[in-house]
Amino acid sequence: MTKPLPQVDAALLARAQHGDRSAHSELYEIFGGMVFTLARRMLASKAAAEDVLQDTFIEVFRKIGAYRGEAELGFWVKRIAINKCLMQFRSGWMSRRCDEGEDILLAEPARAARLDDQIALERALDALPDTARMVVWLHDVEGHTHKEIGAMLGYTASFSKSQLARAHERLRDLLEPDEAEREADLCDPVLKTC
Amino acid sequence: MRPSTEDLLAVRDGEPLDASAKAVIESSLVHGRGVERLRRVQSALRALPALEPPADVLARVLEAKDAREVDRTRWLRFAAGAGVAAAVATAAIVYVSSSGQPRQPEAAPATFVASGEPSAPHATATPVSYVTLVEQSGRLDQLLAQLPAQRPLMTGATASTIAGLEDRIAFLDEQLAFSAAGKLPVPQRVALWSDRVELMNALVSVRYAEAQMNGF
């Protein structure tokens, strides 16, 4: 079950649609964390996530006058944020971006970390290849289907499935190396011990 | 047969899966544990805490929004100013064109200036409207010369419009030079001069509007 989206009352929305500056600030307060978290998890870069946050809200404030309530406002904001993340991802320079001073563990796996260790999980997530990380977040957390993710990334649903599997295998290697070794011992594909 | 991670994920997510693969997974404690582990990872990912957005981003967003509104206002002012300037320029041209000139009735038949001896074709049988057009064209040339030089930086659309008009005028001038050699009949020369006056009118209007934007 995905997290419920923050709710916005009609009066605040109306004020925001009329360009009220304080209403825009309130919307940022409500949705800013959601957008930044999404971007940071998907892109594994604080600087890129800040860019997405900024670009998302510039677009939200620019287009909110045209928002007609077809979907929940939170969903609408999130769609814009995901599109901005995908634009960053497609631009090609995101993966080359290096966040100096950030505690991203790209080369060294989180050894013997436990799954309930959130810091270790965050690091393991950051250490995933870009596409696998985006797919695992969009599927397992945001609740998108493989068909939707495939369409977003310009690939097929099968591609999304294989990326999700790759992401989970890598997460297992990083977070539960002992478990991964044990499974490898139990399930040797050559000896067909599974 | 060893089920792949994709198979385990299909079981976890309740997605369609080959019956034999599903049976293997459901009958095996090891694979059942694998599915359970995938569920725990998903739950753990969903339980990751929300992050606080950096404090300064809102200020940057509002700044960008304000800058955009200022740009929009400037653009609207520009559009309105350009429209007014074009109207003023057109009125000025009409005034300049008609001042000091005995007005000829539009529908009147062409009047020819009599000449004692036949020389060049246009000297012996020149319609007044032809002379008027040549003079109008000359006045527009003078008006254009009085306008300040073009800005090095102007919008692509304005620069393109000006260049297009100048090209067409240059082409007409070539044709007029050819006609001056007496190789074109008078009605066609009148048509060329009429085209030139129209194009010059347009060029002066655009250049005037552009000059107005720069405080002319």
Image (cartoon, grey):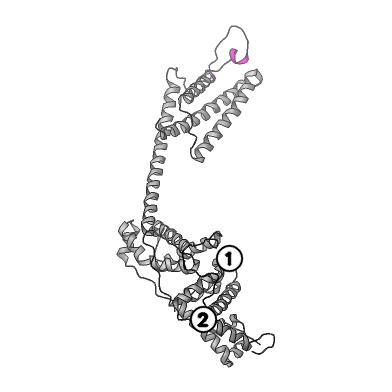
Q: Quadrant of the N terminus of chain B?
A: bottom right
Residue found at the very far top of the displayed protein: B116
Q: In this view, does A146 lie to the left or right of B103?
A: right
Q: Is residue B67 left or right of residue B150?
A: left
Q: Which amino acid does label 1 sit on?
A: Gly
Residue behind mark 1? A154
Residue behind mark 2? A112
Between tags 1 and 2, which lies in front? 2
Q: Where is residue A52 in the image (x, y as percent from the top left)?
A: 45, 61
Secondary-structure class at tag 1? loop
Q: In this view, does A187 lie above or below A145?
A: below
Marking on residue A59: none
Whether label 1 touches label 2, CB < 8 Å: no
Q: Position of residue B157 (x, y in %)?
A: 51, 40
Q: How crowded is mark 2: few (under 14 residues within 10 Å), some or many (20 or more)?
A: some
Residue B125 within the magenta-colored segment of the rendering: yes
Main secondary-structure element of the magenta-colored stretch: loop
- Cα distance, mark 1 to mark 2? 36 Å
- Magenta residues (range): B111-130
Identify the subunit bearing mark 1.
Answer: A
Question: Which of B9 and A194 lies nearest the eye of the viewer?
Answer: A194
Residue B211 within the magenta-colored segment of the rendering: no
